[in-house]
Image (spheres, helix red, strand yellow):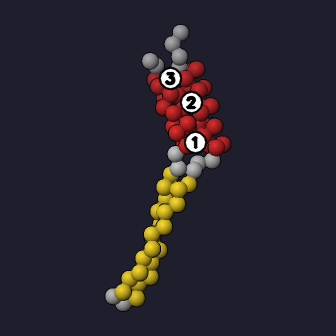
C-alpha cells in the first residue's frame, strides 16, 4: 500500500471515531485557607463538532483516492 492511502485510511478512521467517542476534560477547583484545603474535581465529556469530523472523513477519502494503486 502506498503512504497516501495509509495516511488517508488513518485520517478517515479518526474522523469516524470522533463522531461517536466523547473526549473527557477534567478541571480542579479548590480553596485553600491555612492548613485546610477543599477541592472539587469536575469532569466534562465533550464531543468534536460534526463539521470537523466530516472534514476529516472527506480529507481521508481524498487521500485514499489519491494514493490508490494503479
The residue sitting at 44% across, 18% down in the picture is 1
Say what secondary structure mark 3 lies in. Answer: helix
Q: Is residue 19 above or below residue 67?
A: below
N-terminal label among 1 and 2:
1
30 to the left or right of 57 = left
Q: Which mark is residue 5?
A: 3
N-terminal label among 1 and 3:
3
When asked about the image quadrant of residue 35, the answer is bottom left
Q: CA distance from mark 1 to mark 2?
A: 15 Å
> Which residue corresponds to mark 1?
19
Residue 62, image x, y percentages: 60, 26
> Which residue corresponds to mark 2?
60
24 to the left or right of 62 = left
N-terminal label among 2 and 3:
3
Q: Is residue 18 above or below residue 2?
A: below
Q: Residues within 10 Å of mark 3 (few under 14, many from 20)?
A: many
The residue sitting at 41% across, 81% down in the picture is 38
Q: Which mark is residue 68?
A: none
Residue 41, image x, y percentages: 45, 69
Amino acid at each position: 500500500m502506498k503512504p497516501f492511502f495509509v495516511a488517508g485510511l488513518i485520517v478517515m478512521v479518526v474522523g469516524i471515531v470522533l463522531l461517536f467517542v466523547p473526549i473527557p476534560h477534567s478541571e480542579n477547583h479548590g480553596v485553600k485557607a491555612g492548613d485546610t484545603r477543599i477541592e472539587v474535581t469536575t469532569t466534562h465529556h465533550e464531543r468534536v463538532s460534526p463539521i470537523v469530523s466530516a472534514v476529516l472523513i472527506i480529507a481521508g477519502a481524498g487521500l485514499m483516492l489519491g494514493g490508490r494503486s494503479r
